[in-house]
Amino acid sequence: MLKKLNDYLYRLPRTGKMQVEGLIITSEKLLPALYRDESLKQLQNAASLPGVYRAVYGMPDLHEGFGLPIGGVMATVLPEGLISAGAVGMDINCGVRLLTTPFLAEEISRERLAELIKAIEKYVPAGVGKKNWEKEVRSLLPKVLLKGARALLEEGYGFAEDLNKIEEGGVLAGAEIKALSETALSRGAEGLGTLGGGNHFIEVQVVAEVRRWEVAQSFGLYPGMLCLMVHTGSRGLGHQVCTDYTEILYKAGPKYNVSVPVKGLAAVPFSSPEGQRYYQAMLASANFAYANRQLITHYLRQVFKSYLGDGKLDLVYDLAHNIAKEEFHDGIKVLVHRKGATRALPAGHRENLPLFREIGQPVLIPGSMGTKSYVLRATSNISLTFNSLNHGAGRSMSRKASLKNLTVSEVKKALGDVILNEKVEYVRDEAPQAYKDIDLVIEAVVGAGLAEVVAVLKPLAVIKGKD
DNA sequence: ATGTTC
């Protein structure tokens, strides 16, 4: 089905109703997983939407999702082009934040680390359905929806300089509370300040390797540093918004003569009332997620202050990997849907935050549970993929299959010395065996000439929520 | 991903 262009770039040729071709960043070793699930078929479906621009892209962590595959990038020409809730995904602005700590990893014993993650769990409830412990934050919801991480800052949760290192300054303009259902609002209120389940985590990591010294230094990363990585999103709020609007867009589609191959790609013109409504709801959910990671950061600072005596945690960066964004490519205004894909702005790109304008933004790529994570920087070739990179390792086995096939001892072995808060049994579907090899995924984006490795992070302890 | 078949 795929045509090899070079070692790391494959073409998904136009067939059937495809309006554009697909381009996939992958490799010989990663290919078999693509043929085991529906991701290529889903990419073909996306390529068949009217008005899809230039090509649809698959990142090396590509795998089956709802509508657009995870690791998929799809752009539509504005203003008449389509917007699809399913092409953003259930967890709107699921994303990653990396923090440095004032400690070297070697200063903190395993015993201390184990205590630390217990303390973190008290402040940041982990697991599906968990609610925030600090009821006061619930009243911040309206402000959070409109002003994102900035809203929390105004309430004393964080420092002004935090915003300089959050994509978009931690807030997207245009959110509307009216666009959210009552259910979405109530799920949002309870979920603010919680981690969630699935692939979400808080990880204590060490900077194990620095490959680009100057760049790492400008990102604030030095070898041996103890770091914290937070991976979470908009919790039940984003999930509800995606569910609500997939239904709304699916029903409204015919009104605009839009027919979609599957309900998961339900879409309407961006400029239509329904399209704008979804976009406003998506922006509010994205703001919520930036704020969620900000609130969690506040709690982490409290824990570090009380348990280790120093709560000075500095942001490296915070980015979204499930979002749709209005951007210019080839001089044309498009709506880029990234689902399980990260926007990656190279050095010199004018849309970078001021701090990163010259050097380019850090691209944070978490590995699977217990495996390495990477900090990358995009090269100037990144325009090939609308300035997009992968978001992680990507599943290679479904949750169901991993729970069925993986034993506790196999998973324990894969985790090695990494401390885990939860019983291994409950997070078997998050085992490294259920994911692609992060090293191969990174090799693909580097080999394709899209990115370079700045630093490699190794996990020491991980907090996961149980499903 | 998810009050995982509200």
Image (cartoon, rainbow, N blue to C red):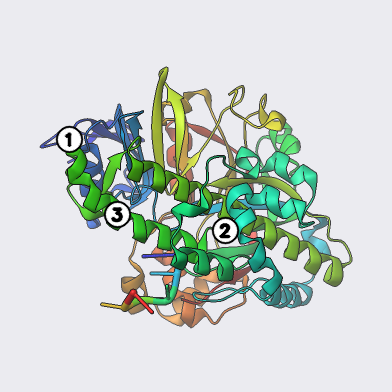
- The answer to whether residue A262 is left or right of residue A231 is left
Could you tell me if residue A376 is visible in this image? Answer: yes
Q: CA distance from mark 1 to mark 3?
A: 25 Å
Q: In the image, what residue type sits under mark 2?
A: His
Q: Position of residue A343 (x, y in %)?
A: 50, 38
* Chain designation of label 1: A
Secondary structure state at the residue bearing disc 1: loop
Q: CA distance from mark 1 to mark 2?
A: 34 Å
Q: Position of residue A345 (x, y in %)?
A: 55, 31
Q: Which residue is mark 2?
A: A231
- Of residues A423 and A188, the one nearer the viewer is A188
Check disc 1: other Cα within 10 Å, few if <14, some if 14-19, many if 20+.
many
Q: Earlier in the sequence, mark 1 or mark 3?
A: 1
Secondary structure state at the residue bearing disc 3: helix
Q: In the image, what residue type sits under mark 1?
A: Met
- The answer to whether residue A393 is above or below residue A407 is above
Residue occupying image coordinates x 39% and y 48% = A88
Q: Which residue is mark 3?
A: A248
Q: Which residue is mark 1?
A: A18
- The answer to whether residue A406 is left or right of residue A147 is left
> Which residue occupies the extreme right position in the image?
A309
* Chain designation of label 2: A
- Of residues A466 and A240, the one nearer the viewer is A240
* Chain designation of label 3: A
- Of residues A411 and A257, the one nearer the viewer is A257
- The answer to whether residue A68 is left or right of residue A294 is left
Residue occupying image coordinates x 12% and y 35% = A15
**Residue A275: quadrant of the picture:** top left
Q: CA distance from mark 2 to mark 3?
A: 29 Å
Q: In the image, what residue type sits under mark 3?
A: Ile
